[in-house]
Amino acid sequence: MGKVYDGISGRLREFVEAQPVFFVATAPSGAQGHVNVSPKGMTGTFVVLDEARVAYLDYHGSGAETIAHLRDNGRITLMFCAFDGAPKIVRLHGRGVAVPVDDPGFADLLAAFPAPPDRHGLRAVITVDVTRVSDSCGFAVPLMSYQGDRDLLVQAHSRRSAADLADYRVTKNAVSIDGLPAISPARARAPRG
């Protein structure tokens, strides 16, 4: 039987920080639109800020569903599964905000990550004010071995200039697949250093 916790501390915090992959789920408001689930990983891209707040680094990707949904309604769930050791699943439900690289608060948030991967290609920091922390059994989650991080995302972004990334935001990240605004046009076009 699952348990609801008052916050992210102790062994629960150790568990979520130790997982090499987690999943992010968001959805637009209303009955229409697509639910989005994205896998996230790479060592150094997730941090527990305090017992009720977490953050993760958001790199350029093929879409911007999470950012669009957060702009629309803020709802987000992060799920962590144990693929080795004791079977466990932890879900963090809350309200999220995307803090883009040109936001005045971005540098302070980035400083909370002790060892982030290469910053090139970083689009935003997603912060989550956690309103519900729960666990459940992971009896049906398969046992798998972690072999290491892939460096393909960082490599792909290192080949792009600031202007290339700005163009990418304009052409691929301005709206969600449902047409919701994601990255504002002014921010999408602003070249990054």
Image (spheres, rainbow, N blue to C red):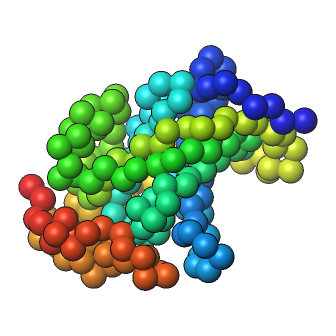
The image quarter in which residue 160 lies: bottom left
Image coords of residue 190 (percent x, y)? 12, 66
Q: Quadrant of the image for the C terminus?
A: bottom left
Identify whether 133 is placed above or below 120: above
Is residue 20 in view from this perspective?
yes
Extreme top residue here? Answer: 10
- Closer to the camera, 166 or 68? 68
- Closer to the camera, 192 or 2? 2
Image coords of residue 122 (percent x, y)? 28, 54
Is residue 14 in view from this perspective?
no
Q: What residue is drawn where x is 10% and y is 65%?
A: 191
Image coords of residue 123 (percent x, y)? 29, 57
Identify whether 62 is placed above or below 95: below
Identify whether 96 is placed above or below 47: below
Q: What residue is drawn where x is 20% and y is 49%?
A: 103
Identify whether 188 is placed above or below 119: below
Q: What residue is drawn where x is 60% and y is 26%?
A: 8
The image quarter in which residue 5 lies: top right
Q: Is residue 110 left or right of residue 91?
A: left
Numbered circles on residues, count: 0
Q: What residue is drawn where x is 24% and y is 33%?
A: 108
Q: Quadrant of the image for the N terminus?
A: top right
Image coords of residue 75 (percent x, y)? 55, 55
Extreme right residue here? Answer: 1
